[in-house]
Image: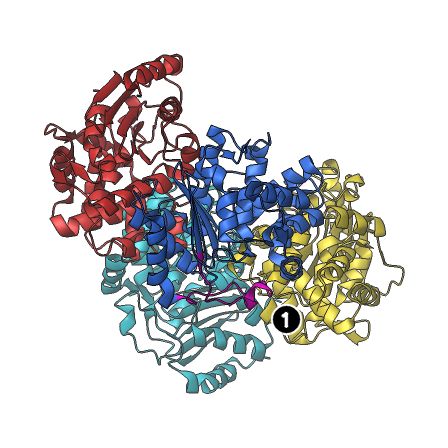
Chain colours: A blue, B red, C yellow, D cyan
Amino acid sequence: MIHYQDILDAIYLELAPHFGEGRIATYIPELAKIDPRQFGMAVLTADGHLYQVGQAETPFSIQSISKLFTLTMAMDAPTLWQRTGREPSGNAFNSLVQLEYENGIPRNPFINAGAMVVTDLILAKHGNAKEAVLRFVRHLSGQDHIAFNMTVAASEESVGYRNKALAYFLKSFGNITGDVEVVLDAYFHHCSIEMSCTELVKAGMYLMNHGASSGSQILDFSQTKQVNSLMLTCGTYDAVGDFAYQVGLPAKSGVGGGILAVMPEQFVVAVWSPGLNEVGNSLLGTRALSLFTTKTGMSVF
Amino acid sequence: MIHYQDILDAIYLELAPHFGEGRIATYIPELAKIDPRQFGMAVLTADGHLYQVGQAETPFSIQSISKLFTLTMAMDAPTLWQRTGREPSGNAFNSLVQLEYENGIPRNPFINAGAMVVTDLILAKHGNAKEAVLRFVRHLSGQDHIAFNMTVAASEESVGYRNKALAYFLKSFGNITGDVEVVLDAYFHHCSIEMSCTELVKAGMYLMNHGASSGSQILDFSQTKQVNSLMLTCGTYDAVGDFAYQVGLPAKSGVGGGILAVMPEQFVVAVWSPGLNEVGNSLLGTRALSLFTTKTGMSVF
Amino acid sequence: MIHYQDILDAIYLELAPHFGEGRIATYIPELAKIDPRQFGMAVLTADGHLYQVGQAETPFSIQSISKLFTLTMAMDAPTLWQRTGREPSGNAFNSLVQLEYENGIPRNPFINAGAMVVTDLILAKHGNAKEAVLRFVRHLSGQDHIAFNMTVAASEESVGYRNKALAYFLKSFGNITGDVEVVLDAYFHHCSIEMSCTELVKAGMYLMNHGASSGSQILDFSQTKQVNSLMLTCGTYDAVGDFAYQVGLPAKSGVGGGILAVMPEQFVVAVWSPGLNEVGNSLLGTRALSLFTTKTGMSVF
Amino acid sequence: MIHYQDILDAIYLELAPHFGEGRIATYIPELAKIDPRQFGMAVLTADGHLYQVGQAETPFSIQSISKLFTLTMAMDAPTLWQRTGREPSGNAFNSLVQLEYENGIPRNPFINAGAMVVTDLILAKHGNAKEAVLRFVRHLSGQDHIAFNMTVAASEESVGYRNKALAYFLKSFGNITGDVEVVLDAYFHHCSIEMSCTELVKAGMYLMNHGASSGSQILDFSQTKQVNSLMLTCGTYDAVGDFAYQVGLPAKSGVGGGILAVMPEQFVVAVWSPGLNEVGNSLLGTRALSLFTTKTGMSVF
């Protein structure tokens, strides 16, 4: 019998002296304004209990965690694995080097280039990629008020030269079929979605639950395992080995300071703390998850 | 209740028409002579049952699977994680490129350069790295007859120019402290160790068992999880993402055609089939493990 | 006493059986339509004589030869050598790899990224970079009818995704200060300028003449030598070593099939033949220049 | 009429306040002991006059300048240009990266890997590559006392791990046919040859003289131009563009602080000053040559 609430409370106490550590992502002007001393955490267990600590209900910019939801939407696209690989990149998330050496095929759907290809697939299927993803996230979490932060989206768009470079580079290899500016607009908006830890664990329920979530089957048994495996090998930027070593759970992180992780059949956990470590994962978020798997004794290894 | 023997038999039947597929590693003259149509598999469960199919008792060259045992021996070396990283490389196992960009620190202990650094650590501690590893493997498996194949070791040494280049490159960065030729000699001998699938699952028992194996504690609880995580993120050459996607188990492969995999608290499984896929993992071995996790419904995801 | 006309005639005769060899640049739809069997050559000597053979007066798309003129215009920009290097790249002319490793500083002003930075410098100084360069080329050659080919410019712009990627990548490093789309528009137009071999040798007169050209001083003594040195070490894509070995003259080539070369104090020579070799220099143009330096016995070496 | 002696004297005076600047190559223990305040320069003109200033007769370690002489010896080897390229590398002289990407074919004969291939060619032809090169250098300069510095050779051999890595890497690609240790031994000895500036200009006479030197024809007319072109595009490490821009002469430098340069049909010039700039060329040597071409008004551009 694991006492999740006690564990969350203990983690909060242990990390409280460190709140504010790490560096905020400043390349997006709007994100740079955030108060770095915030910390929230939420756990949803297989038996339906929800546990929270700190600012578990404060919405924040999910940024690259959105790549988990776009991938989920595209898992049945027939050309998905022709147009992106599924290997860790061994390089920065926004690197163009590997893309050039590997002829425009991104290493995996969780680096920026891969997520743009996935967005392009969603665009081809749904017409309006921007709205389709927002609708999907609302459906997953059962929260209709979830929305883009238009200021953040505009902020990213105004300085997102490297992402523009990536998108045009993909287009030059023929690996974006839609209009580059439309794909980028959708991509920037997905990153700007705001959710709380509590909303994230609800949205991620299907990951622990063989693909099922509040009555609907989001993915099948196999696909769910596949998405979880991709989170573990590619989900935490250029630190997947270290993250698996420290935490031992499939996870997807974002530069907004959020991380969503899953222990299949057991729990979904989300944590948020804006300060990042040197590879771009939340510094205290990673530490909180490491404490969580140590204290619960539960990890996939 | 999983019927392991039935599952092994079914896998054997399903793969039998494909025996001999894949390409044998021919760069080591002695390995090129092997009969490619061989196939063996063994499973050891947490409750102590052993299941076998095919040539489960035929010894073969474990090659890079030895890197798992050398890493295990070095897990308590204080400088281990200063001298090697723990990230997937995203490059070929014998590439020098990343080593140059990253100043002589190998990406992880499972690529050749990393294993040489580990061998150097063992050399510094045990004096005779070559024999120390052989003794350790015999102890783990309880099989005193396990031995080097001197012809294979000599064969690798005679053509191992790239490995020599790697070792001298490491030395140029100061990341080999011992004599380069001594380290290489030990390294080539470790790769030449011959074991059967059955011996491998016995040797790997500690990986499913929180570090305990036939009365001795090989690694502690945490270290065992860490080694398993490294197998998952770095253990199968430049295909860890795909392997996790297809198989979903921590594993270490070798160009001799063997793969050792583990489901914590449940089972250790070893498979052997000499034909390799394009990244150097056993072609039918990978397929067998994929069938195994599908049919048992058990993987870490 | 060198008989230039005889030499040109002999070269024409020798190469005539090969007219049409090489491959046309097809990535720009408009250029792909050209008749590959054309060949022209013109020589302007220090004493003012002009020699011609073949289609020496047929205008063609100068493409990257324009980079020579834009560099010349920017030679007195104070930040030029902070914003671009002057080393051969060792990579394809449109590679993004080196740019990423070297933080957005292009290797030299003759690769695409470097020419975009130069265009940005001209934009900052002249306001209208597009027209400023055209005016400059008209002035150099004394030919007011020289113009952009608007169809070629539009053609390049419509498929120039890789160049867009390069420009946004430069912008992401802060190495383009102006508006990316304005820089690109100017860049594409410069490449689309059409000139004949005869017009090119007139425009290049300053390169053999210590910077002086028809009464005006385009560059000073030192700058002229510097531009010539840059042509030799960086002017012929990723084949500068081979070009120096075969031809032995400072030169700038373009994918339209033109090459402009100079023997200081002696002559300027231009050649045009649309078929390219595997690195993007005119196949017969390179051969013609090699014959020219052999037959005249004149090269810088 | 150029007053060479006056120019040399003026250069000496101008640079004297800077003697000792730059950093000595310290990776070879024996070279690290040198007095950094030394400076010598010698010029040999086409009409046979010799001009000297400073320590023009002090022997120093020619290091990579030896690569010029080994290349000269191998210019008629039929497989030379299959086994090495002739392009600037764009990378450090001892990089292994490019060698891996380009399958063991060094970019040019002036980087370490290329010079090892050249040494291997000489070994195949002469049996004793070590002595053959020494004999050749003695013959070129007419100085029979020129010798290896055995202490320097041993010093380089004892720490030359990166060069060993390079050599074994070449061997792994089949681009060294002889015994690696024999090739390395010859290579290290060639680098250890000691010559003075005066001896170097005599040895380099053929480079300004269409291949002829004191009665014998070392190279033919074409080959001489080719070697000069290779010096210009590949002779000064990863700074050929900058060197051509500043100096404007074909040249070969060494980490011992020497540089040998040539103005075809006019002069050979050698300079020596042990302090190096950040790319490994003599700091004051480069400045001296820049002053020399400015003051004489003579460069190939």
Where does residue B252 sit, x and y in percent of width and height? 31, 35
**Around disc 1, counting alpha carbons within 10 Å, would you say few (fewer than 14), some (14 to 19), or many (20 or more)?**
some
Instruction: Tell me what residue is drawn at x 35 percent, y 75 percent.
Output: D57
Instruction: Tell me what residue is drawn at x 31 percent, y 21 percent.
Output: B2
Where does residue A126 sit, x and y in percent of width and height? 69, 37
Q: What stretch is highlighted in magenta?
A: A19-40
Instruction: Count the marks.
Output: 1
Q: Answer with the quarter of the image where residue C142 lies.
A: bottom right
Q: Pinpoint the chain carrying mark 1.
A: C
Can I make out residue C197 in this image? yes
| Quarter that holds the N terminus of chain D | bottom right
Can I make out residue D184 in this image? no
Q: Where is A238 relative to D271, above or below?
A: above
| Quarter that holds the C terminus of chain D | bottom right
User: Mark 1 = which residue?
Assistant: C80
Q: Nearer the viewer, residue C101 or D192?
A: C101
Q: Which of C66 and B25 is in front in this view?
A: B25
Q: What residue type is labelled 1?
A: Leu
Residue positioned most to the right: C145
Q: Nearer the viewer, residue D295 or B79?
A: B79
